[in-house]
């Protein structure tokens, strides 16, 4: 347990204020001389009608605060500073981690509250570009974070599998499609004919009419068009599945836009009955002035449905089906207005669940130094990014294996490179706040000393190798509650432990703000603090067996924490490297 809570409880007992109100106020002082926790008393001066320094003085002298886990309690100005007994602290925290293993930091707060996470949602027949990679990585991580907190999670892939472009594709395929090419590389072939269609359309407007007619046939369920569309969809999905497999991502539901198209008439009726549908320039819209938003178009002037109406139908369907606690959309920030309109229409129609719908946006993806031989013009396809990352990682690991003569087999090197190379790409997406633009740079993302996945994985693998080496010598980590753990009381040991103790909080904050980077940061801080400790302490060379066992226990808790952190980010670790 994080001792912050214990401090809050003592303060609560001494002041009569609830500890949940106090916990937010407790600070971690910037300087070690000011203790491990500090409580700023000005937050109480209004209700107690006393000056902060007086309150601090009274509290510091209060016997309630003289708990056995505290070294001393001190007043400095308007602050009460708490110094905790480091050995006790380390023992308590490590015991919990050692005891719980990978279950550490799990919570049951989400029991029975279903959370829908919609992410990835690529468009059929179009390449899976790096923007889709961003939502995929974020959504995958957010799903795991909510699961860790006990929420039942449903992963939804809202495929872009509907719209007038499918009329164009059907027309184009009948004219120029190559069946063999379609089966060999579906998206490449579909993109080729789509691009061709747009070129030809400029010269031959008749194509536009034919495309429109084919879409109409598709919408009305005409067999030939539906079959072709189905084939495009299935083949695209097969290609996407390769990417998802590689990233370790799965979905519970692939209901795309097409799934909701026949649910739109009911939406139109509902909006009509509630008197919300207004005629505007031939289209049917819902006015959203009171939300300070432009009107939301529900039906276009030709009577066809649009993206927004499909999203409204989808939200209603999701609520009926899942009675969700939260309905999260991981979609790029440029669609923020769209989601505000959709949620506002639902609110205006009286659906209170609209406040549980959340748009989780993210920034753009840029490239610093990368020269890609992209297959698809100027967009960067995830597949190429992964391929290149894995290849570069392979070179690094191979060179290192030769240098250190690790005796790793070729297949082992390949397996490790795959995990580390993909991890490096994933980490780049989750290392900063999601709304910031991302800049990919090979030098940065593959730096084994930097804030990177390779660094985390390497730290993990090295700690595992220490544990293996110790086991060969017959030395094992101290078990939970062992008195040996009290021996870990240096600043460095304390620093690592403290970061581990903060992990559960970091996970909760990450869930509340839909920000996986908070977990990335916590995990990388743990790794960094551990490496500082490791570089200054020779874990296995000491003379005292109990001390060695205690340090191995710290090592083991670090491994567990890195394993938990990377898992929540969707990154695989390796046992040696
Ligand atoms: N398919 C869309 C795109 O690639 C994203 C779909 C977002 N989800 C939604 N419910 N509108 O831009």
Image: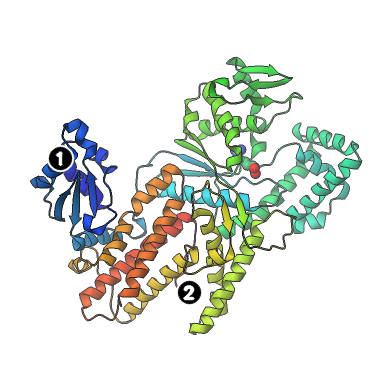
Rendered residue at 63%/61% (across/down): 385
The disc, 2 or 1, on the residue closer to the chain's N-terminal end is 1
Between residue 439 and residue 203, name the one nearer to us: 439
Q: Position of residue 418 (x, y in %)?
A: 56, 67
Residue 64 found in image quarter: top left
To which residue does mark 2 refer?
A: 577
Which of the 4 image quarters holds residue 489? Answer: bottom left
Q: Position of residue 13 (x, y in %)?
A: 15, 41
Direction from residue 378 to residue 425 in the image, left or right: left
**The disc label shown at residue 500, or none:** none
For disc 2, the neighbor class at 10 Å (few under 14, some 14 to 19, many from 20) is many
Dot 2 falls on a residue whose secondary structure is: loop
Q: Quadrant of residue 258?
A: top right
Residue under pointer 1? 55
User: Where residue 176 sits in the image (x, y, percent)?
Assistant: 87, 50
The residue depicted at 21 percent of the width and 48 percent of the height is 6
Colouring method of the image: rainbow
Q: Nearer the viewer, mark 2 or mark 1?
A: 1
Question: Vertical placement of 458 versus 134: above or below?
Answer: below
């Amino acid at each position: 347990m994080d001792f912050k809570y214990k401090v809050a409880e003592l303060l609560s007992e001494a002041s009569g204020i609830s500890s949940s109100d106090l916990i937010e106020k407790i600070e971690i002082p910037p300087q070690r001389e000011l203790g491990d926790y500090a409580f700023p008393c000005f937050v109480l001066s209004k209700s107690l009608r006393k000056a902060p320094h007086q309150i601090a003085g009274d509290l510091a002298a209060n016997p309630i605060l003289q708990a056995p886990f505290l070294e001393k309690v001190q007043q400095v100005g308007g602050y009460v500073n708490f110094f905790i007994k480091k050995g006790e602290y380390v023992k308590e925290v490590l015991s919990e981690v050692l005891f719980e293993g990978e279950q550490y930091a799990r919570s049951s707060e989400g029991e029975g509250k279903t959370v829908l996470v919609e992410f990835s949602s690529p468009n059929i027949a179009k390449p899976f570009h790096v923007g889709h990679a961003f939502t995929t990585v974020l959504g995958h991580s957010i799903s795991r974070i909510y699961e860790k907190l006990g929420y039942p999670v449903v992963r939804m892939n809202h495929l872009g599998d509907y719209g007038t472009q499918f009329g164009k594709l059907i027309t184009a395929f009948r004219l120029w499609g190559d069946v063999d090419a379609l089966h060999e590389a579906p998206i490449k072939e579909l993109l080729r004919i789509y691009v061709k269609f747009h070129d030809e359309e400029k010269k031959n407007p008749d194509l536009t009419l034919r495309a429109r007619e084919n879409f109409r046939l598709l919408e009305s369920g005409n067999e030939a068009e539906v079959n072709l569309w189905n084939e495009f969809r299935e083949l695209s999905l097969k290609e996407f599945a390769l990417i998802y497999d590689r990233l370790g991502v799965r979905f519970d539901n692939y209901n795309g836009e097409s799934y909701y198209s026949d649910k739109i008439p009911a939406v139109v009726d509902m909006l009509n009955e509630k008197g919300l549908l207004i005629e505007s320039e031939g289209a049917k819209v819902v006015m959203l002035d009171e939300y300070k938003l432009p009107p939301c178009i529900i039906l276009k002037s030709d009577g066809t449905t649009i993206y927004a109406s499909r999203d409204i139908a989808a939200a209603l369907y999701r609520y009926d089906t899942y009675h969700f606690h939260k309905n999260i959309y991981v979609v790029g920030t440029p669609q923020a207005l769209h989601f505000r309109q959709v949620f506002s229409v639902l609110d205006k129609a009286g659906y209170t669940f609209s406040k549980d719908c959340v748009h989780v946006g993210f920034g753009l993806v840029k490239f610093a130094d990368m020269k890609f031989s992209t297959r698809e013009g100027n967009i960067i396809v995830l597949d190429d990014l992964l391929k290149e990352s894995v290849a570069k990682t392979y070179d690094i690991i191979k060179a290192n294996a030769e240098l250190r003569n690790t005796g790793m087999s070729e297949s082992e090197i390949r397996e490790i490179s795959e995990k580390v190379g993909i991890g490096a790409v994933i980490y780049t997406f989750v290392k900063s706040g999601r709304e910031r633009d991302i800049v990919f740079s090979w030098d940065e993302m593959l730096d084994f000393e930097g804030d990177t996945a390779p660094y985390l994985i390497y730290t993990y693998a090295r700690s595992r190798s220490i544990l293996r080496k110790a086991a060969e010598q017959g030395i094992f980590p101290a078990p939970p509650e062992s008195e040996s753990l009290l021996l870990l009381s240096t600043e460095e040991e304390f620093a690592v432990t403290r970061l581990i103790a903060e992990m559960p909080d970091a996970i909760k904050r990450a869930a509340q703000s839909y920000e996986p980077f908070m977990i990335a940061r916590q995990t990388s801080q743990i790794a960094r603090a551990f490496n500082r400790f490791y570089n200054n302490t020779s874990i296995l060379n000491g003379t005292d067996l109990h001390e060695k066992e205690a340090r191995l226990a710290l090592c083991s808790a670090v491994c567990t924490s890195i394993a938990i952190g990377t898992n929540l980010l969707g990154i695989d670790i390796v046992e040696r490297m």
